[in-house]
Image (cartoon, rainbow, N blue to C red):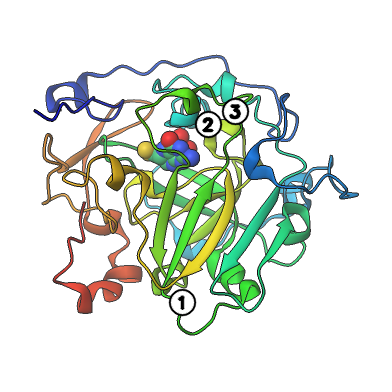
Amino acid sequence: MHIVKRRGWEIAESQVTAEHLVVNRRSVLSGAAGLGTIGLGMMAAGGSALAQGASPAAASPGAVARNPKFEAGRALTDEKFATTYNNYYEFGESKNVWREAQKLKQRPWAIQIDGMVKQARTIDIDDLLKQVQVEERVYRHRCVEAWAMTVPWMGFPLSQLVALAEPLSAAKYLVFETAQDKATMKGLASPFYSWPYVEGLAIDEAMNDLAFLSTGLYGKPLQGQNGGPIRLTVPWKYGFKGAKSLARITFTDKRPKTFWEGLQSREYGFWANVNPAVSHPRWSQSRERLLGDDEMVPTQIYNGYGDFVAGLYTDRKSEKLFM
Ligand code: MTE
């Protein structure tokens, strides 16, 4: 018999609304000042003159303008909830990993860009941030566990990184691989999971206006627990698509097997678009609990971003688009 071990988000439906938040004292550490050692994903960027500095975006968050195009239509979640109630399995299965995750050292940090590109390279995050236009966007975030938040990310459109990477015309997918820092990420020792955490997007999804690489939150550098120094943010999909602390982005013509798909393909697929009418095999997705006051509100298809993304899927109707 196949025994399925339950992960943190694989809770029974009865527990989805009953779960109480564990709110801790807000962190005062900046995302760039954690302790710890350089992990495997951080590559050899040790010689960078910018190595210990905060990114330009992080250094002057006040200068980052909010893009009014992405009005979220509901109140912002209080920062303390978004930064103390997290999923980051490399640091453990609990929601309360923020202290541990802040130990992830965020500088130096390099991202490997490879696969079907004109020229593979490793780019230091601060060098990358000099080549993109950073802005703020308020997005709704919907976890497959049925909790949700509304937060102001700072970062830049993923399409700008795709342009810098110069993919070959045959490239069809992007694969996102996240950092593996054995010194701070105790969850990596778990034999149950197949690390690294891997996510993927089709290239047209990556070029969509909404697809974003986040480097800040609430006007501050992104803290470790939220995926600092750089994470994927795709608000029309379930939160697990938003791979944290990116170490490598690979362009390929083959659809990757993602982290959760590899563990339980019956429950988690590649596309993972939000849809209230398609239940998770063990609980409903029709409503969501807003972090903070725990109000339950109806979930919207594509998390309410259908105007931006529905067209991506008209020719993909035969795919399992919603989980
Ligand atoms: N990225 C990595 N590397 N490891 C993870 O465990 N969890 C995912 C996603 N990205 C995860 C990850 C899940 S399940 C969710 S819901 C979001 O991160 C949570 O993001 P947040 O903690 O910033 O709210």
Counting other residues with Cα less than 10 Å from the Cα at mark 1, is it few (<14), some (14-19), or many (20 or more)? some
Report the side of 229 relative to 280 (left or right). Answer: right
Label drawn at residue 7: none
- Residue at the image position 44 percent from the left and 26 percent from the top: 85
Counting other residues with Cα less than 10 Å from the Cα at mark 3, is it few (<14), some (14-19), or many (20 or more)? some
Label drawn at residue 79: 2
- Residue at the image position 18 percent from the left and 28 percent from the top: 4
Q: Which of the two discs, 1 and 2, sits closer to the camera?
A: 1
The amino acid beneath tag 3 is Lys
| Residue 204 picture location, percent across and down | 40, 74
Report the side of 182 relative to 70 (left or right). Answer: right
Report the side of 77 relative to 123 (left or right). Answer: left
Name the image quarter holding residue 190. Answer: top left
The residue carrying mark 1 has its beta carbon less than 8 Å from ligand 1:
no
The amino acid beneath tag 2 is Glu
Q: Is mark 2 on a helix, strand or loop?
A: helix
Distance Cα–Cα, label 1 vs label 2: 38 Å
The residue carrying mark 2 has its beta carbon less than 8 Å from ligand 1:
no
**Residue 6 visible here:** yes
Q: Name the residue under label 3.
A: 182
- Residue at the image position 36 percent from the left and 18 percent from the top: 21
Q: Do tag 1 and tag 3 residues touch (Cβ < 8 Å)? A: no
| Residue 268 picture location, percent across and down | 24, 46
Query: Does label 1 or label 2 sit earlier along the sequence?
Result: 2
Q: Which of the two discs, 2 and 3, sits closer to the camera?
A: 3
Q: Mark 1 points at which residue?
A: 171
**Residue 76 visible here:** no
